[in-house]
Each structure stands twice: as C-alpha cells, then as structure tokens.
Amino acid sequence: MTTPKKFQRLISKRIITREMLEGCLYSANNRAKDFHNEVRRCKRPGYADYEYEEWCRESEDEFYAMKDKLLSIVQPTCIHLEYVEETQKIFEYEPEYYEVMDSEDVIYEDGDYDRELGEYVEYIVARVKEPHYYLFYDLGGAHTFRTPIFNPDRYDLPVVETDRRHTKVVDLADLLSIHFLQKVIGVIESGDYTYLPD
C-alpha cells in the first residue's frame, strides 16, 4: 500500500494520529503473524531450510518488537484471559497425574526410564487448558490489539475472559510500508512527538 500523503505530512511534523498509529500497529502485527505462520510451515516434516526458518523467526520477533514500541504510547484498556488447550506430559510423581489420569483429556499413556530417578516412570499425555493473559488495546478504530503478558497481577486493570480469537489473512500489499513503520518508530523513540488520539 502506498503510504497516504496525509500520514507523510503529519509524521514530518512529528505528529502521530490515532488513525496512523492503528495503521502502523495493524501492519506490524500482520507482518509478524505472517512470519509466525512461515515458521510453523518450516517445522513440517521434511522441511530442512533451517537458515530460512531462523530468518523468519528473527523477522517475527522484529515486527512484534515494532508493535510493542508502537503500543508504548497508548494505555491498555483491560487484560484478556484466554484458556488455550495444549498437550502436556504429566509424570506419575506429579500431583496432577492422578487427577487427570481417568479423565477424557488423556490422549495416551506410556512410560520411560528416568535416569535421574534411576527407575521406570509412567506418564500420560493429556489435553490441558492453560491460562494465557494479554494486555488489550482498543484505540477506538476498526482494529483492536493484544500483547501477551505473564504476570497479570503487575497491572491494575480488569481481567476479562475471552474465547480464542481468530484473525483473517490479509494481503501484505494492503499494509503500510516497513519504511514508514520505521519512520514512526524513530519519531516515538526520539520522544519529540505529539500524539492525537482523536
């Protein structure tokens, strides 16, 4: 997408509008997701281009870092709590083992020799719902944004439980340019800017 002339004029005056910030966040977030999907494709059996996988992982991290820098000029509105189903190996010496053992969440049971303990140990692989927390940002536009956190107690924000969010695939040609994102981030890092939320 060609960067709108209005955005170019405003950023040259060191002014960041809500619309501009939202466009930058949307662009950084979708580029990061695109690289995240590429990393997942690289993990498929038979794929052996490890340099490309590493480059995709670094690019994903770079765009998520851009997103975090862009979000640094606004405040989150709440914390999203989402329970994500994951598989977990639970050994017989763990307290949860006997709680989960007879449930429908068990995928399979097995055992293995534990070298540290010097004995055979049984385990189960089960589906568990793990809590994932995200800072939630609503700028009042067409898109909302989240960023993961590990300790929700550090924030004085309400916690809202949500279902898993699914995002649609976007055409990268519809996003703001990387050059413009870098320009906006440079202005934010300088500390010499005006943010216009309306």
Image (spheres, helix red, strand yellow):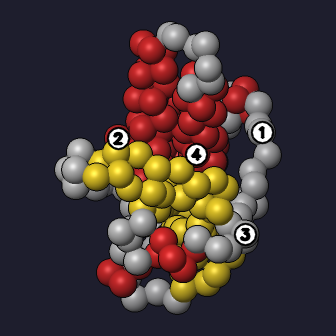
Relative vertical location of residue 52 with respect to residue 78 in this rendering, above or below: above
The residue mark sitting in front, 1 or 2, is: 1
| Marked residue nearer the N-terminal end (4 or 2) | 4
Q: Is residue 164 above or below residue 162?
A: above
Q: Residue at x 65, y 62 (%)?
A: 106
Looking at the rendered image, the quarter that the N terminus falls into is top right
Q: In the rendered view, tell whether residue 155 sits above or below residue 46.
A: below
Q: CA distance from mark 4 to mark 1?
A: 12 Å
C-beta proximity under 8 Å, tags 3 and 2: no
Q: Mark 3: few, some, or many residues within 10 Å (few <14, many ≥20)?
A: few
Amino acid bearing label 2 = Gly
Q: Which mark is residue 186?
A: 2
The relative height of residue 57 versus residue 74 in the rendered view (above or below) is: above
In the rendered image, which residue does mark 1 sit on? 169
Most foreground residue, 129 or 107 = 107
Q: Residue at x 75, y 51 (%)?
A: 167
Q: From mark 4 to mark 2, how far is it between C-alphas? A: 18 Å
Q: Label 1's element? A: loop
Residue 189 appears in view: no
Q: Residue at x 61, y 20 (%)?
A: 45
Q: Which residue is mark 3?
A: 104
- Is label 2 in a helix, a strand or a loop? helix
Of the residues shown, which amino acid type is indicated by label 3? Glu
Q: Is residue 180 left or right of residue 106?
A: left
Q: Is residue 45 visible?
A: yes
Residue 194 image position (x, y, % from top left): 42, 61
Q: Indicate which disc, 1 or 2, sits on the residue closer to the N terminus.
A: 1
Whether tag 4 and tag 3 are in contact, CB under 8 A, the answer is: no
Residue carrying label 4: 29
